[in-house]
Amino acid sequence: MKICIPVSGPEGLDAKLHPEFTETEHLLVFDAESGEHRTFSHGEPEGSAEEPIAVDVVLCAGMAPQLLQAFSDQGIHVFATEAETAGLALMALQNGDAEELVLEGCGGGCGCGGHSDDEDHECCGGENHSEGGCGGGCGCH
């Protein structure tokens, strides 16, 4: 199993978790079978990785519903942790202390779980349904 962790720097397992997955400049990929890890950065030259790396799990501080849906659609499980470093986050996952993030209430209606267009809800704010503010933009479809 390969685990991807957004981190703030190239310090390996001592790197602090980055609070925003989409804004991180470094991703640590940990191979649970071999125990090996590698940190990738946006600054690496193209083609520096031998091949694309498929991951099974993303371990992070939290995630927006749209990105969570995208990972879910690819079969990638997302877990949240309050751990400060990548190493502590991996221990939390191993010990069952990381919480799997799942989209709740999805399955119909405007695309946000079947509630009416007039209801307030977190995934899209419950606003502008007639203008397409929901349906495809909230990630709950």
Image (cartoon, rainbow, N blue to C red):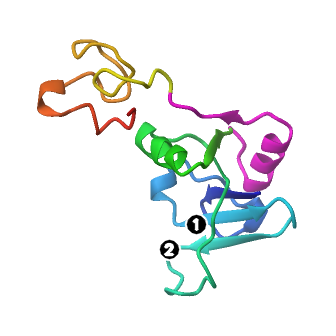
Residue beneath disc 1: 26
Q: Position of residue 101 (x, y in %)?
A: 60, 34
Whether 66 is drawn above or below 8: the answer is above
Q: Which residues are magenta?
A: 82-103
Q: Earlier in the sequence, mark 1 or mark 2?
A: 1
> What's under tag 1, amino acid-wise?
His
Q: Residue at x 86, y 38 (%)?
A: 95
> What's under tag 2, amino acid-wise?
His
For the N terminus, the image quarter is: bottom right
* Callouts 1 and 2 close, C-beta under 8 Å: yes
Does the rendering let one see residue 60? Answer: no
In the picture, the disc for residue 42 is 2
Query: Is disc 2 placed on a helix, strand or loop?
Result: loop
Q: Residue at x 45, y 40 (%)?
A: 64
Q: Position of residue 116 (x, y in %)?
A: 27, 13
Query: Is disc 1 placed on a helix, strand or loop?
Result: strand
Q: Position of residue 19 (x, y in %)?
A: 55, 47
